[in-house]
């Protein structure tokens, strides 16, 4: 029996809605019906959700290399999919969304760690209900009734922010720059401030993102469209440059600025999953003279650089604790928040066409 609100009715049947991409850059709410849960699963009534604004956007636009390519784990190279293989991205019923928060309304007979009524967060697309494995699944996170849903849906970006900070070995007293102040960059900036970096500079062309970075402790922010960001990094650090630069934007000019603003023998943690670069990247000039290091940082690549002490499981445990205990504050990062009924239009506007108007979009189901 459905005990949650329904989005539509047809011939007396109750249907729910899910957010999908029906074509490149086209998002729609479509009807679905839930199957019966298995003995190891729970069903969750969703209250809040959020998409990704980086890699998911590439999927939505059909520009991801995974459409026709795949990563070969044995060779550790990208290879082309054969003609008889399914494509990596297929539109029509392509789920959109990344994280959700909700309440368990059904549980299978083998589930012992969760109860009906538990509030949880996990990975999943934007839809009214979720069916999730609940046996030996640490990614299904319990949370208190009053814990912040906005903090919870930052579980994914916080992992990549922490990985970038650790891979770059940010330490107290460092001069740190964060380029790209989306959710990952904003959380990385918070980490740098709390670690005790003496100079923290946030760089982004979007004013509202710079304002939030300053609120969260940035000593300076720069509009990359209005200045020579690499030069300004040097000026603000008394010509020394940044010990660490966390690059999350994937923009070719951002990387060039990072190479210019880097201190001698400094480190760039390259967190972005970049598109092919156009002309403009020059690895002569400052890159050659500054003897910099570029570390490609990815929280979910195993083994972790600090394995066996660190792996993705530990990264996830740490960021979840920091999100739930208030060490990280993501309330201002989930902006705007749209009602579920308007999430297709919201996705197209705030994630795809006008990202300057958002940081990380939230979807609220509770007003239904």
Image (spheres, grey):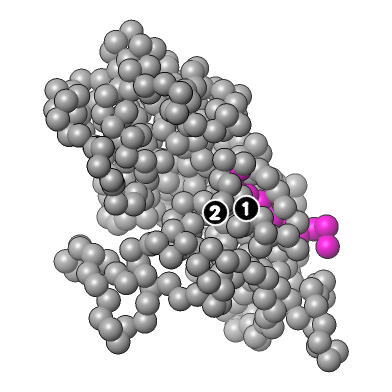
As measured in the structure, the alpha-carbon distance from the residue carrying label 1 to the one carrying label 2 is 6 Å
Which residue bears the numbered disc 2?
A: 352
Which residue corresponds to the image point at 56% horizontal and 77% vertical from the top-left?
A: 93
Q: Position of residue 257 (x, y in %)?
A: 32, 28
**Magenta includes 181?**
no
Q: Residue 225: horizontal and vertical position, in percent?
A: 45, 28
Residue closer to the observer: 125 or 44: 125
The residue that mark 1 highlights is 349
Q: Residue 118 at x, y = what percent?
A: 71, 62
Nearer to the camera, 104 or 6:
6
Does residue 366 show up magenta in the picture? yes
Residue extending furthest top? 238
Q: Residue at x 49, y 47 (%)?
A: 157
Secondary element at image label 1: helix
Left or right: where does residue 320 sit relative to residue 168?
Answer: right
Residue 112 visible in image: no
Q: Nearer the viewer, residue 239 or 176?
A: 239
Q: Which residues are magenta?
A: 358-368
Please say if 115 is above or below 101. Answer: below
Give the SS element for disc 2: helix
| Residue depicted at x 42% and y 50% | 314
Q: Position of residue 293 (x, y in %)?
A: 21, 33
Q: Which image quarter holds the C terminus?
A: bottom right
Residue 245 vs 362, above or below: the answer is: above
């Amino acid at each position: 029996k459905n005990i949650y609100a329904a989005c539509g009715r047809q011939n007396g049947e109750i249907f729910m809605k899910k957010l999908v991409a029906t074509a490149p850059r086209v998002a729609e709410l479509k009807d679905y019906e839930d199957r019966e849960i298995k003995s190891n699963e729970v069903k969750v009534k969703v209250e809040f959700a959020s998409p990704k604004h980086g890699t998911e956007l590439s999927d939505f636009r059909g520009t991801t290399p995974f459409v026709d390519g795949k990563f070969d784990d044995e060779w550790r190279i990208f290879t082309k999919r054969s003609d008889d293989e399914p494509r990596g991205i297929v539109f029509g019923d392509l789920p959109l969304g990344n994280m959700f928060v909700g309440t368990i309304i059904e549980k299978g007979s083998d589930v012992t760690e969760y109860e009906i009524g538990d509030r949880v967060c996990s990975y999943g697309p934007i839809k009214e209900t979720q069916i999730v494995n609940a046996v030996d699944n640490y990614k299904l996170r319990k949370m208190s009734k009053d814990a912040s849903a906005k903090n919870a849906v930052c579980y994914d970006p916080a992992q990549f922010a922490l990985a970038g900070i650790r891979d770059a070995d940010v330490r107290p007293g460092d001069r740190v720059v964060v380029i790209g102040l989306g959710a990952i960059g904003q959380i990385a900036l918070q980490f740098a401030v709390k670690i005790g970096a003496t100079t923290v500079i946030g760089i982004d062309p979007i004013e509202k993102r710079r304002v939030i970075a300053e609120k969260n402790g940035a000593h300076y922010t720069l509009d990359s469209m209005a200045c020579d960001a690499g030069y300004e990094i040097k000026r603000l650090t008394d010509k020394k440059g940044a010990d660490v630069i966390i690059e999350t934007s994937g923009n070719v000019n951002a990387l060039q600025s990072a190479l210019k603003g880097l201190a001698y023998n400094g480190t760039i943690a390259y967190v972005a999953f970049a598109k092919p670069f156009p002309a403009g990247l020059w690895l002569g000039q400052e890159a050659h003279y500054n003897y910099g290091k570029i570390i490609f940082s990815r929280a979910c690549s195993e083994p972790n650089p600090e394995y066996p002490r660190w792996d993705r499981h530990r990264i996830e445990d740490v960021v979840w604790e920091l999100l739930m205990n208030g060490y990280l504050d993501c309330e201002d990062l989930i902006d705007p928040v749209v009602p579920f009924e308007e999430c297709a239009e919201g996705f197209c506007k705030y994630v795809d066409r006008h990202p300057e108007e958002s940081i990380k979009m939230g979807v609220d189901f509770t007003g239904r």
